[in-house]
Image (cartoon, rainbow, N blue to C red):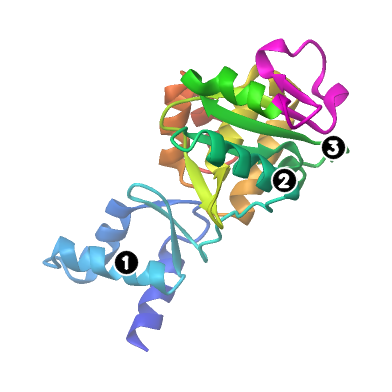
Amino acid sequence: MRKKTESNELIKAFEGRNTIELKEIEAFYRKSDPSIPKTTVNWRVYNLVQQQVLQRVGRGLFRFGKTELFTPQITPQMKSVCQLINRQFPFVTYCQWELLTVNYFSQHLINFNILFVDVEKDALNAVYYALKEHQTKVMLVSNLYSDLSDFDSFIFVRPLISDAPLQKVNNYKVASLEKILVDLATDKELISFQSNEIYTIMGAASEKYTINHNTMLRYAGRKNKRKGIETILKSVNCQ
């Protein structure tokens, strides 16, 4: 009962806030117990996350609610690509994601799809030619000459930024939601999503799923786009 009362008081104290910093939670506990050890605060925060009262959205950054991680559907084409790359290039770092993922978050639904296969630069051309031997619609993103909508069902092979945030779904290597959102906001081939739509996409994704802001900003920094992502996150009240 004490834990429930405590969590209710915490929610009331920060009512209306989108995110809360760890130092603010610590200050909340120190109001009633000025000598409380920092380790005890950390343990209480950990318990609140486990109880799904809080979700962690960055280093020392939280918001109320249950942690909801985005898990993309693995299509037969993605499985086929993964198996080919794993067989021929077992030590290459890569990931995949589908453009139709945008429809989870966008107001304006798209009716075409592209599979992005992002590969570490040293293996980019080798993976491209290997895919070309098995797939008819494969293109290097550097050869893009028209709007993406003209390339329905294509596979686009792109250079993978080092330390990009990736995940595994049933042993298939895919992009994390943080990577997808930053790519949508920054990559020139995805410019059609970078007007007002990116704010809608970012806001809807943040409402539905737990997104690590530090991961996003670190990846954006690798692309020299950190300030732009910070601006979008602040505009959609994610920070």
Q: Residue 105 carries which label?
A: 2
The magenta span reads 132-155
Residue shown at 74% from the left, 44% from the top? 77
Q: How far apart in space, not on screen, are marks 2 and 3 (Cα)?
A: 11 Å
Where residue 147 appears, as percent x and y from the top left, is: 82, 18
Front residue of this view, candidates 94 and 175:
94
Q: Is residue 24 magenta?
A: no
What residue type is disc 2 on? Phe
Quarter of the image for residue 202 reads top right
Mark 1: amino acid: Tyr
Q: From the top left corner, tell me how far across and down residue 238 is, in percent.
A: 53, 43
Question: Local crowd at mark 1 within 10 Å, few (<14), some, or many (≥20)?
Answer: some
Secondary structure under tag 3 reads loop
Task: Using the image as rendered, state which of residue 41 and residue 120 is in the foreground.
Answer: 120
Instruction: Tell which of 24 and 158 is nearer to you.
Output: 158
Q: Earlier in the sequence, mark 1 or mark 2?
A: 1
User: Label 1, label 3: how many angstroms apart (C-alpha)?
Assistant: 40 Å
Q: Is mark 1 on a helix, strand or loop?
A: helix
Q: Are the residues tagged 1 and 3 within 8 Å (C-beta)? A: no
Please name the residue shown 46% across and 42% down the image. Answer: 213
Tag 3: residue type? Ile
Q: Which of label 1 and label 3 is nearer to you?
A: 3
Tell me if 25 is positioned left or right of 157 in this view.
left
- Tell me the number on the disc at residue 110: 3
